[in-house]
Amino acid sequence: MRKWGRRGWRSSGRRRRSSGKPRKKMSRRKLLIFLMLLFILFFAQTFIFIERNLQGPLMTVATVRVKQVATQSINKAITEQVAGNSNADKLIDWKTNASGKISGFMLNYAEHMRITSETIDTVQTTLNKMGDLPERIPLGQALGSAIIASFGPRIPVKFEPIGAVKVDLNTRQKDAGINMILVEVYMHIVAEVSIIIPFDTKPELVETEIPISYLLVVGDVPMYYYDNKGNPVGDSAPGAPNISLPMEQGGDGVSTTTETHDAEGNSGGNADVPTLAPADEP
């Protein structure tokens, strides 16, 4: 009886132990599956939150930062390599009349093409180098909060040139006095880059203007000129005709009446201009 009882007890104990092991394995598998599903759900919620709420502000901050970095790099490279080697005397061809006075000017085509070609190569090389150095923006800046603007994980931002660089060499004139004109020669540079942030990309144009040279053109001195009050100024000012400034309507400078005449042609003085009343409709 004892042996049988011991064997039976031992056999039943073994069965209980063996039946308990698969239950622990099943519980671990369920826990692992639950944790995986929870992680996937959390990742999906995070992705949706970034997609809806942070994508726009983050792209705006990244666009401003990329434009700032690209513009500074382009200006520095052009100033050092292109603008410093240009010759203002060769850049502009001045046109003179028979008396030797300047009558106009035009850009030198050969110098124009040389500067444009060097500028395109310099800008393209600069953008390629800057694209390999990613910028990092704190996530707090995308949230628009001044308190946590410098906190949070730093989001990597990169940009790559995706189009040809366009360079235009132009001039503009500004009045520098009574008989002087300031001619400015400048370059207008346009480069297209692609801004890359996590989960999004956007093409953007980077534009900048770099002055090359300033030229002052001095003309003939006028005999007289008029100031902002209409008074003549100069050596020949006493012989200059007077200019009456326009007055407001109904004031002393503008007449609002007409002169009338009778049947014999005599003047009858000033009278108000009659107004025509609309005819009655039948």
Image (spheres, rainbow, N blue to C red):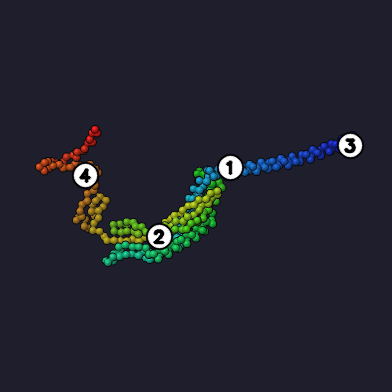
Horizontal side of 189 relative to 255 (left or right) equals: right
Could you tell me the amino acid type at mark 4? Val
- What distance separates the C-alpha of mark 4 from that of mark 3? 137 Å
> Reading the chain from its start, which is encountered first: label 1 or label 2?
1
- In the rendered structure, are the residues bearing label 2 and label 4 in contact, judged by CB atoms less than 8 Å apart? no
Residue identified by numbered label 1? 45
- Give the percent coordinates (x, y) of residue 227: 26, 52
Residue identified by numbered label 3? 3
Could you tell me the amino acid type at mark 3? Lys
- What distance separates the C-alpha of mark 2 from that of mark 4? 49 Å
> Reading the chain from its start, which is encountered first: label 4 or label 3?
3
- What distance separates the C-alpha of mark 4 from that of mark 1? 75 Å
Horizontal side of 79 relative to 276 (left or right) equals: right
- What distance separates the C-alpha of mark 1 from that of mark 2? 51 Å
- Give the percent coordinates (x, y) of residue 237: 21, 55
> Reading the chain from its start, which is encountered first: label 2 or label 4?
2
> Reading the chain from its start, which is encountered first: label 4 or label 1?
1
Q: From the viewer's perspective, is residue 76 above or below residue 258?
A: below
Horizontal side of 10 relative to 129 (left or right) equals: right
- What distance separates the C-alpha of mark 3 from that of mark 1? 63 Å
Q: Residues within 10 Å of mark 1 (few under 14, many from 20)?
A: few
Horizontal side of 219 relative to 162 (left or right) equals: left
Q: In the rendering, which numbered label is found on residue 169? A: 2
Q: Residues within 10 Å of mark 4 (few under 14, many from 20)?
A: few
Q: Residue at x 50, y 53 (%)?
A: 194
> Reading the chain from its start, which is encountered first: label 2 or label 3?
3
